[in-house]
Amino acid sequence: MATTIDVMGQFKLATALGPVGASVNFTNSNLTMVVVCVLILALMHLGMAPRAVIPGRLQAAAEMLYGFVHGMCIDQIGEEGKAFFPFIFTLFSFILFGNLFGLIPYQFTITSHLAITGALALFVVGLATVVGLRIHGMHFFSYFLPKGLPIILAPLIVEVEVISYLSRPVSLSFRLFANMMAGHVVFEVFASFMVVMAASLGILGYVMAVAPFALDVAMTGFELLVAALQAYVFAVLACMYLHDAVHLH
Amino acid sequence: MTDAPDESADFDRRLAEARQRQGLEKPAAPDPKANPSLLGIGLRVGVEMAAAMVVGAFLGYWLDRVLHTKPFLLIVFLLLGGAAGVRNVWRVVGPKRPGRGTDGA
């Protein structure tokens, strides 16, 4: 067998930027994060530079992104949501651009690493907890005791609610990580089918390799949906957790 | 231009008609928040269930290590984790909370 199927190799971290990057362990993941942030800043800066009444394409994209997240914050959190808009906007655009950037061939997908999604999720839940404690003080812990609960059941339900609360960062981070990683593994599996077919079946293999290639093309469309949907889901859930922290129940 | 308001109202009406013809005016735009897609729910529910059980098992295992009660707390917290998982799923698919029109958490 000339070619081996190595679907996980694409997630490997390597130092970027030559010896300078190696000396400070600056990885390809870090580099991609910097690129993604620059892209977001470029979209917002260049998009809003003309300040036209009738927006061009770039300005429309920037305005729609802003309006979409702003609407989401107010819908999900309420009027207090305006205070969290910068945070949610940063979170959403970072994840969205990270997901989409990973779909460019040969580019690294930052959200396919649990370390990244886990850090984001822990920050969201940590922020929600701090906000809840800041607004409601010790009253915040009544969140773990649903209204109208018979007092006999309290010892049981409180534990269930605490576990449910603690499972938030886990489910939040795993959903994004698993979706992005699974998609890229499937890409690579189909792509390696092409290589294996072409290498082992000669001219017939080249003809048959069209099938996995077509699947990869179709997958790209589906992954675009997943990339946007998962960024949206992450941001909406962050909003809901903040809503719970602000309003309790 | 004395009839300016009238003209603009007429223009708005014609614009609305034209947009209707072109299918630009979506009938009560299907808001993803008001009516979350089945795909979105499906993607959420499985992870919510599993995450609560993992957290429950981990808590039980850790408490067992600290309190030297192997393996009782692991069993208890695994069950509690399952219950929390059902709670999480219920939050997603259950009846919406009163006072909020949008997708209840």
Image (cartoon, rainbow, N blue to C red):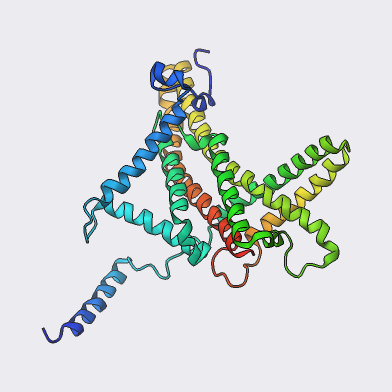
**Residue A171 visible in the current orientation:** yes
Asked if A76 appears above or below B85 in the picture, the reply is below
Using residue A112 as the reference point, say whether residue A51 is left or right of it: left
A132 and A222: which is toward the camera: A132
Where residue A199 appears, as percent x and y from the top left, is 45, 16
Outermost residue toward the left?
A: B1
The answer to which image quadrant residue B87 occupies is: bottom right
Q: Is residue B23 left or right of residue B70?
A: left
In the figure, A30 relative to A166: above or below? above
Where the C terminus of chain A falls, by quadrant? bottom right
Determine the residue positioned at 65% across, 67% down: B95
Which residue is painted at 21% across and 77% down in the image? Answer: B11
Residue B105 visible (yes or no):
no
**A196 over B23 or under it: above or below:** above
Query: Which x, y percent locates residue A163?
Result: 73, 50
Question: Between B49 and A121, which is closer to the camera in this rendering?
Answer: A121
Which percent across, then down, holds residue A211? 45, 32
Q: Which of the 4 quarters of the picture holds residue A139?
A: bottom right
Q: Return the x and y of residue A176 as percentages of the image width and height.
A: 54, 43
Q: Residue at x 83, y 57 (%)?
A: A155
The residue most toward the bottom is: B2
In front: A76, or A221? A76
Image side of residue A215 versus residue A48, left or right: right
**Numbered circles on residues, count:** 0
Name the residue at 40% across, 70% down: B27
Residue found at the far top of this picture: A2
